[in-house]
Image (cartoon, rainbow, N blue to C red):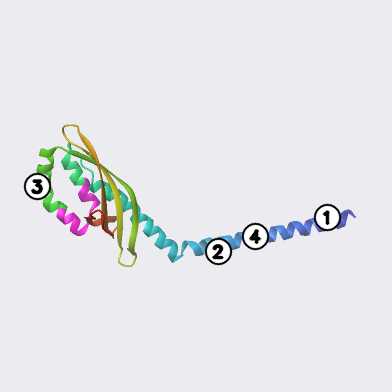
């Protein structure tokens, strides 16, 4: 009797071990397939573009009235292509006007969505709703909500190539 139980116990353990090894092998194969999946790569690009858009849109709507030049440098670092060219071209004039005004703004992206993504060309289009807190030199503050459409290009990092205000009431 003891031998019968021993053999039966041994073959049950062998079967369980074999099933475990097969499960591990199948899981590894499935994981390897998923890592190379185009849908997963697309989702990663989409998430990266959305994160970059949120960050850069907030930067381009934020201004430190006490250190305008640093804010303008942050703007040019968030931009690429035509938008960066425009910011560099108008930077000195903008800095003078903003320094005289002394107004500070702090922007927070409330919501954003990728509405177009072309992974082949490395471009994306994002829409966003932004809350901008404006503090005048006098200390008076107001809050404004704005909507934007942003174009992005993927170089080493996603950067804004355009930022257009969307008027309220338009689709």
Q: What element carries label 2?
A: helix
Q: Is residue 122 left or right of residue 11?
A: left
Dots 2, 4 in contact, CB < 8 A = no
- Residue indicated by mark 4: 21
Q: What element carries label 3?
A: helix
Dots 2, 1 in contact, CB < 8 A = no
Mark 3 or mark 4, which is nearer to you?
3
Mark 2 or mark 3, which is nearer to you?
3
Give above or below for 45 relative to 99. below
Task: Choose the circle earlier in sequence order: 3 or 4.
Answer: 4
Dots 3, 1 in contact, CB < 8 A = no
Residue count near mark 1 (Cα–Cα under 10 Å), binned few <14, some 14–19, many ≥20: few
Task: Choose the circle earlier in sequence order: 2 or 1.
Answer: 1
Q: Residue at x 35, y 56 (%)?
A: 113
Residue count near mark 4 (Cα–Cα under 10 Å), binned few <14, some 14–19, many ≥20: few
Q: Nearer the viewer, residue 138 or 93?
A: 138
Residue at the extreme bottom of the image, as rendered: 120
Spatial CA distance of label 2 from label 1 is 35 Å
Mark 3 or mark 1, which is nearer to you?
3
Q: Is mark 1 on a helix, strand or loop?
A: helix
Spatial CA distance of label 2 from label 4 is 12 Å
Q: Which residue is drawn at 71% across and 58% down?
A: 16
Identify the disc placed on residue 93. Answer: 3
How far from the left and from the top, in percent, is residue 154? 29, 59
Identify the disc placed on residue 6. Answer: 1
Magenta highlight range: 74-86
- Residue indicated by mark 2: 29
Q: Is residue 157 visible?
A: no
Q: Which residue is drawn at 26% across and 57% down?
A: 150
Image quadrant in which the C terminus is located: bottom left
């Amino acid at each position: 009797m003891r031998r019968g139980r021993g053999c039966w116990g041994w073959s049950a353990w062998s079967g369980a071990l074999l099933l475990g090894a097969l499960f591990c092998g199948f899981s590894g194969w499935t994981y390897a397939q998923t890592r190379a999946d185009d849908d997963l790569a697309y989702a990663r690009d989409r998430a990266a573009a959305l994160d970059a858009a949120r960050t850069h849109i907030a930067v381009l709507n934020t201004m430190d009235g006490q250190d305008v030049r640093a804010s303008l440098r942050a703007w040019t670092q968030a931009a690429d292509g035509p938008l960066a060219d425009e910011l560099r071209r108008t930077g000195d004039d903008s800095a003078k006007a903003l320094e005289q005004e002394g107004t500070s703004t702090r922007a927070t992206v409330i919501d954003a969505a990728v509405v177009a993504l072309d992974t082949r060309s490395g471009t994306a289009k994002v829409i966003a709703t932004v809350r901008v807190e404006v503090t005048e030199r006098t200390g008076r503050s107001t809050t404004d909500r704005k909507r934007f459409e942003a174009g992005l290009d993927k170089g080493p990092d996603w950067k804004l190539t355009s930022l257009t205000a969307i008027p309220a009431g338009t689709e």
